[in-house]
Amino acid sequence: LHILSTSCLFFFPQVHGKKLYLAFVAAEGPLGPTAEETVLQTEAASGASSPAQGGQEQVCAPQILPQDKDLQELQHSRSAVPDTAGGPGNWLCFHFGLFGSIRANEFSRANKANKRGDWKDPIPRLVLHFESGGFLVFYNCRMYWCSSPWTDPASDILSVEFHRGRALDALCAPDPICYTLLDQRYFSGLGNIIKNEILYLAKINPLTQGSLLARSDLEHLLDCAIQFSSDWLHSKLRGKRLHPQIYQKEQCPLGHAVMKGTLGPSGGFKRLTWWCPQCQPVVSEPCS
């Protein structure tokens, strides 16, 4: 099912952690001439690949299919797109959570059969088509309108404005270190794979309380987080795959048996965690 709109817009993206913000601004006026008719799809059966386009793009005003309850709520939260970027509810936020993803100029295809034995391609939540011929496809994400992006570069481990001091103070808390690393208030964008890998690289047991670790150990852990995240990002941009050392492994690189557990704060979200008890021994007393 396709939905067409004659209201053409520019959009401007911002990224913060696992959230993507798109600002929709009317193409008429100071930004330039009106674009040709473009298409917004909420479901797409197929599509031809096109060269990726950079910079600002022109898209049409989002409209929502009534069959999707979440998308109905999104539509109800926003009846019309304002004409200026500063207007209320002019930013569309995509929260990718654990399994959300975005693809440019291609659709995700099934790589295995489901429990019923069917080979069904994932269904997009939203597809934005551009006048240039390219398109973006959003999967498994939550969407909602907001008045402006919530951004805090000081918590983004890959930002030049990242606040190391604030992050180190958070790591010093008397909580298992694996809980603190997933706190997006201090480590925006740091996810479960990164948590597992950097704790192994720093030789820190995930259940060790941060308050028991030496400041130098926490500094090293933070360095590992920044370096690993940066290397992973650049590998993805070059189309290379990540080769984890501990995540989902049965043995560590030294051949030791790996332990696995579901760890998380009481009453909070718990994540699968892998660690090597020999390479990452438990610390029960304060380090000197």
Image: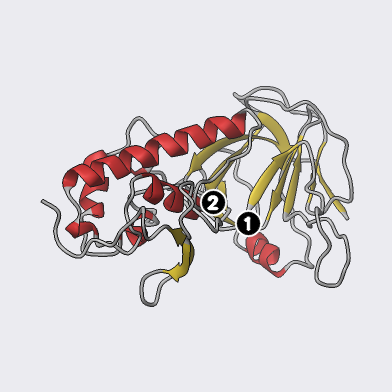
Going from the N terminus, do you reach mark 2 or mark 1 first? 2
104 relative to 97, above or below? above
Q: Is residue 270 visible?
A: no
Q: Is residue 74 visible?
A: yes
139 relative to 129, above or below? below
Tag 2: amino acid: Gly
Q: Say which quarter of the image contains residue 118.
A: bottom right
Quadrant position of the N terminus in the picture: bottom right
Q: Position of residue 263 (x, y in %)?
A: 42, 69
Q: Position of residue 43 (x, y in %)?
A: 82, 54
Q: Nearer the viewer, residue 246 or 150?
A: 246
Mark 2 = which residue?
89
- What residue is drawn where x is 39% and y is 53%? 184
Tell me the SS state at disc 2: loop
Tell me the SS state at disc 1: loop
Foreground mark, 2 or 1, reads 1
